[in-house]
Image (spheres, coloured by chain):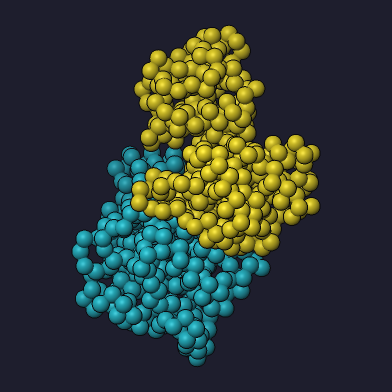
Chain colours: A yellow, B cyan
């Protein structure tokens, strides 16, 4: 487990997207976050106290979370310099970047010398099993998407909170670096060796012998030509009883692929359900979660109504409308 | 490139399945194989001269191919002992096992000392790109399957040979360890990091600017709950113009998964075509290749007729019947 509380690294970030992981922690684990670290040129803030490494350490911070993303997921020179300074100030380091802290000679040497820990959350656990597809006990819900970055993690966490508020046991199961940092554990499913995708999903949410739900964070989309293999392996391994479809209306093209349209919602949902039936024959859809942040309130409400009518499912924006209707449907189906 | 000719390692193999890779080389690259190495307890043979490492080296062998598979893909004690002896006799080593030659301290040290090379063909190339899904020039055919180990590699190689015999340029593109050893290059698609499956397939068969065909070896099955993610990523990245469906009639269950039925052929083909259309909208199926080795000649012929009638496609066993009808259909569709 990564020692808390955290100082959240923003570095020299120029935009919101590049601090996605730090923001995820600030939103979902505010009780663990005591400040942010910004270089002078940093263009964004999480609204937390801006602390130096020494100030953060003296206020009790235990770990600097390098919650930034850049092209290629590499450790840039600023980031390496700051990581070394944080170690000197007595902070452990956690990172979700592709390039591993452990692979940087200077960082590794200084961590050993100072007795501090390095957490590379993008590193999958060793010895994952091959997926078996055997029916296992317990209730599982998986979020699936029309595209990448449409709010699957946010939706899954919102469902966890809403179920718990109704007294239903629910456990968020993380499959991406931000989710893993929020949950404290999980498997970065996009970083496992291809043969083990489904096995990793089975490992993340093994047989659940108690009442309540495992809520599994989805990844990518069956209709994204770069990453659909990850999504399908996760779908088979997750063995979901229930699916929630996530979507961002008005997106001009699939993420990263200009000129490529998003799939039709009905087709996308049908194909996810059909593929899921391979390991979970009775799977049902219980709702649609949409990200309407680019729409006015009236437009958002009209879009949700239309999707709801088209698919016969409750449709909500988890941020602006909550997920109560989706939870109602889930509990109604699995009363 | 791995220096030829080869000595094929059989070791203490107890059955045919465990020498699959050595046999693949003996069948498809007989001109490169000058002998086999068998321990006294070995229960199988490829019909090649049984040579010691020293005999093989004196007859000109350059590389010992460790073409065996065992549970877990590990280097057992016999195999390590033999690998070291082969290095002492002056042979390079090539292996398709999961456990890498490079990770064995003794083997690595002796190879460095003797100036000989180690080839771990299960090691994917570094710096694979993310798949882009952009339409690229050239004709590509992909073999897909109802299950694992139904003859996709054999079929793909048979198509290469048959096309070349008709004067059509054709290049086999390997995606598994046996295929890579036969072709001399390729990418072990089941060993790449999950995010890069489609990208690896695009890398294996990049834009083809000349006439003729890239023939891409398929892996797994969209309907295999352990490995479907690999199959889908490969399907999207391959961007195939033509599919050939591979199947073994009479198989009692999906490979490794007792109690799990094989998919219906029509459904399996339809879902492969539909998924392929995401990156190759005009893809067509041109034939079905069946492995009828467990059937009598009459049964085999009846099965092929029935499948052919049901799917409206030529259906042949590449081993006993060749692939001429499938090639006819391919050339007819893309004349």
> Image quadrant for the N terminus of chain A?
top right
Q: Residue furthest bottom?
A: B298
- Residue placed most toward the observer, B225 or B93: B225
Q: Residue at x 33, y 73 (%)?
A: B159
x then y, percent, for residue A164: 74, 37
- The reply, left or right, for residue B42 in relation to residue A4 is left
Residue B268 visible? The answer is: yes
Q: Residue at x 48, y 72 (%)?
A: B269
Q: Residue furthest front?
A: A298
- Occupied quadrant, residue A323: top right
- The reply, left or right, for residue B151 in relation to residue B87 is right
The vertical placement of B195 against B219, above or below, is: above
x then y, percent, for residue A246: 56, 47
x then y, percent, for residue A190: 49, 44
- Occupied quadrant, residue B212: bottom left
The vertical placement of B3 against A298, above or below, is: below
Q: Residue at x 66, y 58 (%)?
A: A284
x then y, percent, for residue B194: 47, 48
- Residue placed most toward the observer, B185 or A300: A300
- Residue placed most toward the observer, B236 or B51: B236
Q: Residue at x 61, y 13 (%)?
A: A60
Residue A113 visible? The answer is: no
């Amino acid at each position: 487990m990564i020692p808390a509380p955290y100082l959240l690294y923003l570095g020299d970030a120029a935009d919101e997207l590049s601090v996605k992981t730090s923001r995820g922690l600030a939103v979902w684990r505010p009780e663990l976050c005591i400040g942010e670290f910004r270089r002078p040129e940093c263009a964004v803030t999480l609204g937390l106290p801006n602390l130096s490494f020494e100030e953060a350490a003296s206020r009790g911070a235990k770990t600097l979370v390098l919650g930034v993303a850049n092209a290629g997921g590499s450790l840039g020179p600023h980031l390496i310099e700051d990581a070394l300074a944080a170690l000197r100030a007595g902070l452990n380091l956690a990172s979700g970047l592709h390039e591993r802290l452990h692979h940087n000679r200077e960082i590794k040497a200084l961590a050993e010398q100072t007795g501090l820990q390095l957490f590379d959350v993008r590193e999958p656990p060793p010895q994952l099993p091959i997926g078996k597809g055997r029916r296992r006990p317990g209730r599982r819900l998986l979020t699936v998407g029309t595209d990448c970055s449409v709010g699957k993690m946010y939706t899954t966490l919102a469902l966890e909170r809403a179920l718990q508020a109704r007294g239903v046991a629910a456990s968020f199961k993380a499959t991406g670096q931000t989710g893993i940092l929020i949950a404290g554990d999980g498997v970065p499913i996009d970083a496992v060796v291809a043969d083990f995708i489904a096995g990793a999903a089975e490992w993340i949410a093994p047989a659940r012998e108690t009442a309540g739900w495992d809520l599994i964070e989805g990844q990518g989309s069956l209709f994204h030509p770069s990453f659909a293999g990850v999504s399908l392996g996760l779908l088979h391994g997750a063995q979901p009883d229930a699916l929630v479809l996530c979507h961002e209306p008005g997106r001009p093209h699939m993420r990263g692929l200009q000129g490529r349209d998003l799939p039709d919602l009905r087709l996308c949902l049908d194909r996810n359900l059909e593929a899921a039936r391979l390991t979970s024959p009775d799977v049902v859809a219980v709702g649609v979660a949409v990200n309407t942040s680019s729409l006015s309130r009236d437009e958002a409400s009209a879009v949700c109504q239309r999707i709801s009518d088209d698919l016969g499912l409750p449709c909500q924006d988890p941020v602006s409308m909550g997920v109560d209707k989706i939870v109602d449907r889930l509990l109604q189906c699995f009363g």
